Amino acid sequence: MKGKIVKGIAGFYYVKTVDGIYVAKARGQFKNSGITPMVGDDVEMQITHVQDREGIIDRVYPRKNSFIRPPISNVDMLAVVVSAYEPKIINYDVLDKFLVMAESKETDIVICMNKLDVADEKDIQEFIDIYKDIYPIYKISGKTGEGIEDLKEILKGRTVAFAGASGVGKSTILKKLKPEAEIETGELSDKTGRGRHTTRHVEIFDIEEGMVYDTPGFTSFDVSVTDEENLAFMFPEMSNYISQCKFDNCRHLKEPGCMVTKAVEEGKISKRRYDSYISQMDSIREKKNY
Ligand code: ZN
């Protein structure tokens, strides 16, 4: 039977099938193959006990993509949440790291601006001017619910993960999207007798026809998601210029005949975004030399 892993706790996987949820373990021989099932995996499962809803996972279907922290797979879209007021005015550096990570995994990307009810109009506008031609931006308020219905529309039929620095209000948005999500978590935990409040874990919940990852959050970055040569391709607004640079191996730093730096000078590429590019290039080079 085919299913999708929607939650994993200590070697037990909650597999969602057309027939409801089963709790399964991974078959020993395939564990030895080095593949560890993760939340988001589409799997082939054998039911071992119908009454107790137990099964065993025989194989994991090829993944579209996968992330390490948090360990999730098959993400169609990453919704990057930024806060337009607190904890502070938008942290562009962190945001651009999330965006590069998402680009490297070839997911669709949207930006959610949260906490608009307390945001300063000028901060919002500055932000929108930089990103509006690069990614779809959704203005939402997890508190008042503004924009939540629009957000639901784009989630339909997709598996979506929310990313963002701590304090930007991811969980408030998730609660607005699915107010009953916490109740379901409690019920599932009870089945294993592990209590209601287990450690923070990764889980998927349904939102109408879409699936949303409820994760402890993307908290750390792996700069090795890309390399020197490909970093510029993770900045979509640079892609038109890259091929016109004088040198094929241009890294768009101080090379003569670089069309990217020219576009920055002419204001066609945001200086802020270019600064993020430089900063990430530095991180990649530091790691290489380490
Ligand atoms: Zn260049």
Image (cartoon, grey):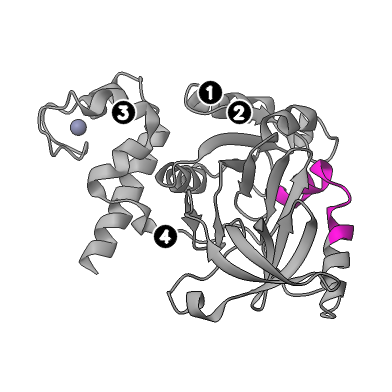
Secondary structure beneath label 3: helix
Q: Nearer the viewer, mark 1 or mark 4?
A: 4
Task: Look at the numbered discs 1 and 4 and tell me whether their residues touch, using CB distance below 8 Å.
Answer: no
Q: Position of residue 267 (x, y in %)?
A: 35, 20
Q: Is residue 214 visible?
A: yes
Q: Amino acid at mark 2?
A: Ile
Q: Amino acid at mark 1?
A: Lys
Which residue in the structure is indicated by mark 3?
239
Predominant SS of the magenta segment: helix
- Drawn side of residue 192 relative to residue 281, left or right: right
> Which quarter of the rendering shows the N terminus?
bottom right
Relative depth, front residue between 180 and 284? 180
Which residue in the structure is indicated by mark 4?
222
In the rendered image, residue 268 lying in the magenta stretch gets the answer: no
Mark 2 to mark 3 CA distance (whole Å) = 20 Å
Secondary structure beneath label 4: loop
Q: Is mark 2 within 8 Å of ligand 1?
A: no
Which residue in the structure is indicated by mark 1?
132
Q: Is residue 162 above or below residue 2?
A: above
Q: Amino acid at mark 3?
A: Ser
Could you classify mark 4 by the number of other residues whose Cα lies within 10 Å: few (under 14), some (14-19), or many (20 or more)?
few
Secondary structure beneath label 2: strand
Q: Position of residue 79 (x, y in %)?
A: 61, 41
Secondary structure beneath label 1: loop
Residue drawn 37% across and 57% down? 223
Which residue in the structure is indicated by mark 2?
137
